[in-house]
Amino acid sequence: MTVFYILLLFMIIAAIIAVETKNLLGAVICIGAIGFGASLMFLFLRAPDIAITQIVVEVLGLIILIRACISRELTFISGPREFFGVVVSVAIIFAIFLAGIEVLKTLPDFGTPIFAQVPEAASQTYISEGMQKTGAANLVASVILDFRAYDTLGEATVLFTAIIGATVILRKKTKKLLEDPDQ
Amino acid sequence: MKGMTIIVKTISSWVKVLIFLFGIYIVLFGHLTPGGGFAGGVILASCYVLLMLAFGREYAEENLSLPVASKLDCVGALLFAAVALCGLLYGAASFFWNFIHQEYLVGTDYEFNLVSAGTIPLSNIAIGLKVGASLFLVVLVLSMFRPEMSGNKED
Amino acid sequence: MLYALCFLLFMIGLYCAVVKKNMVKIVIGIMVMEYAVNLFLIMLGYRFGGIAPIVDKGQLDLETGQIAAGFLNSSVDPLPQALVLTAIVISLGSLALMISICIRTYEKYGTFDITQIRRLKG
């Protein structure tokens, strides 16, 4: 219980530093600290699958993020936005904060999940019959690839589309650039 | 683009084999131990990214070039859809029906073996292929963008 | 209380994404929000003294195929774990997409400042 508080406070401090620091490379490294803290937290929350995935995804994500801000003329951008924009953003943040406070009151206590009190919850079926019905000892794998495989199909489609988008955006020379001599 | 120092090159040439083997282990044993296609695929991609960072982009492209990576990506996606479609042809005739476990392995005590759980290991292999190839592809594309930008600046 | 700290992390990410002017800072804010949401979903399924949702050899009755009652009463929820597992990999793909947009914009305008980009229209 205490380790959760320590890890969450560590992540919050790293997030504040990442948001407020002027150095862009330092902000990226603080993102790495948040990610590895989240990975440890997943491990203590008894989710080893997600801990493995998070720690590897974090490494690749850091490489991609550092790629964006290395060998650039990093101008330190400071100063506020326009007045109207700031007012609208603060109003949006305040509205979401109030909504979140209302939601926090209705949540169950930490450590006593809802699915444990409802006998006909879907998760109870996955735990009790997942091994017989799919034969996989890892119940997370049985949920991902058998009970809810449509989610995985949609995820594969989204990943495919994101990669196609990144490839098209970073294409060497577009047709417009070739035709337009001004560029 | 010529890569890093001799120390990094030597160590990464030893370690790359272990990382690749660990990725294959995570993919194959995804239905018995923590892991699965997603984590294993990202580990396989990070093996090639390590090669690219240590030896330069040309060396990584000799091992796995961009057309081959994009074809592997498509093959993974098609394999996953094909496993799902096989469930439509067999037995209960529903998409993603786990036909191997329900029809061929029923009643046998194959639990906790590598060959168990029906279509789940096959889907894991397809997902691992797809995730690994596509993530390596995106890092390769991001690193190929560099020369053009510096060329534009000189102009 | 842990949920409130998680919500605080989400609010920090939202503040960063809405107020900052640097494009890479906006991407960083979106990443912080993703971490907070993933953590919150996993926390919802945790129970005290829980064990990971992976069946051991001793917990399965090989003749009847029944799971031991000790596992049923102490396993954490596998459903949010499965949903978050796909969300993490999707976040890496969308991060690559956002970073490629940032690099393309930097190449065209020479800056990451979004107010500058708005003025240099056309």
Image (cartoon, coloured by chain):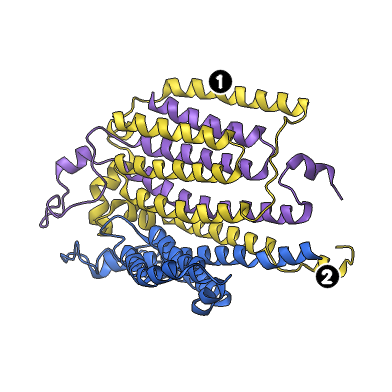
Chain colours: A yellow, B blue, C purple
Q: Earlier in the sequence, mark 1 or mark 2?
A: 1
Q: Residue at x 70, y 34 (%)?
A: A78
Amino acid at the residue labelled 1: Leu
Quadrant location of the N terminus of chain B? bottom right
Image disc number at residue A98: 1
Is residue B138 left or right of B43 when viewed as pictured?
A: right
Q: Is residue A167 visible?
A: yes
Chain hosting mark 2: A
Q: Is residue B107 left or right of residue B57?
A: left
Residue occupied by mark 2: A178
Displayed quadrant of residue C4: top left
Q: Decide if residue B116 is on the left or right side of residue B122.
A: left
Whether tag 1 and tag 2 are in contact, CB under 8 A, the answer is no
> Residue drawn at (35%, 59%), measured in percent from left and top?
B36
**Relative to B127, is A62 above or below?**
above
Question: Does mark 2 fall on the same chain as mark 1?
Answer: yes
Image spot of residue C72 (x, y percent):
20, 41
Please tell me which residue lies in front, C103 or A89: C103
Residue type at mark 2 is Leu
Location of residue A81 (image quadrant): top right
Q: CA distance from mark 1 to mark 2?
A: 52 Å
Can residue B127 be seen in this snapshot?
Answer: no
SS for dot 1: helix
Q: Secondary structure at mark 2?
A: helix
Q: Chain of mark 1?
A: A
